[in-house]
Amino acid sequence: MTNWKKEKQQVVAKEKVSTFQAMLNPKVWILAIIYVSQVIGVFGVNMWLPQIVKSFGGDLATTTIGLISAVPFVVAAVGMLAIGWSSDKHMERKWHMIGAMILAGGCLVICGALNSGLGVSIALISISAIGFYGCMPIFWTIPPMFLVGGAAATGIAFINAIGNLGGFIAPIAIGWIKDYTGSFVGGFYFMGITVLVGCVLSLILFAAFKKQES
């Protein structure tokens, strides 16, 4: 039996959760928190990258800052396609998503620890961006593993609504840390550690799926 057919059988045999129960399901809440962690990293980098480039690069022209700021997203586009292709080819979600999140969070923590020059920082942020943009498409394959019908619509909407709070939290938190410490080092730690916490929750979630199947 092919992996694709096995995956379809797992979907058919999954736990049936009602529309109302979807919002109370612990798995849905864990997924929402995981998504918050991913969004915090993505929005933190997206919103503050030009300022980060400026802080590391010194007196750069605005055009130069814009061009340098585009590098991580170009790299991420290629990496995202590669991760998605690999995940689909091997029909494997767990380690592709968790591996991408470790890459994203780990590189941001390293970036903060090194506090190095512009070149090293942009390289680490670019690798981190691969992880961020690579894990998100895989993330959205998880809710349908245990939600069906109206419950799937409700659960996915709930996860998205809660998760997008990260887009509100990240810019404010990183701005406050920058004002308080005078650098973006603390912001890198905040984003990186938040994503790594999401990794731990992902491991717990997949362990729960495995226990349920057995």
Image (tube, rainbow, N blue to C red):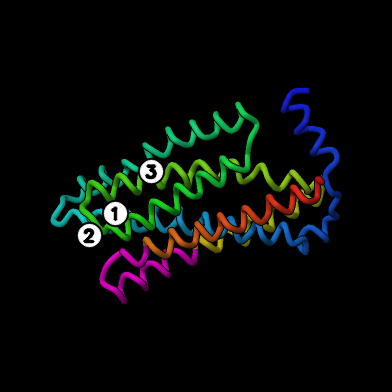
Q: Which mark is residue 55?
A: 2
Pointer 3 or 2: first along the chain: 2
Q: Amino acid at mark 2?
A: Ser
The image quarter in which residue 179 lies: bottom left
Pointer 2 or 1: first along the chain: 1
Q: Is residue 2 magenta?
A: no
Q: Residue 206: percent from the left, percent from the top? A: 68, 50
Q: Residue 117: percent from the left, percent from the top? A: 20, 53
- The magenta-colored residue range is 168-187
Q: Secondary structure at mark 2?
A: helix
Q: Amino acid at mark 1?
A: Pro
Q: Residues within 10 Å of mark 3 (few under 14, many from 20)?
A: many
- As displayed, is residue 98 above or below residue 54? above
- Tell me, yes or no, whether the two marked residues, 2 and 1, touch with CB atoms within 8 Å: no
The residue carrying mark 1 is 50
- As displayed, is residue 62 above or below residue 37? above
Number of marks drawn:
3
| The one of 172 and 98 positioned closer to us in this rendering | 98
Q: Residue 17: percent from the left, percent from the top? A: 84, 53
Separation (CA) of disc 1 from disc 3: 17 Å
From the image, state whether disc 2 or disc 1 is nearer to you. 2
Residue at point 41%, 58% (across, down): 44
The residue carrying mark 3 is 127
Q: Report the magenta stretch's main SS.
A: helix
Residue at point 29%, 54% (across, down): 50
Residue at point 59%, 57% (across, down): 34
Residue at point 61%, 58% (across, down): 201
| The one of 99 and 181 positioned closer to us in this rendering | 99
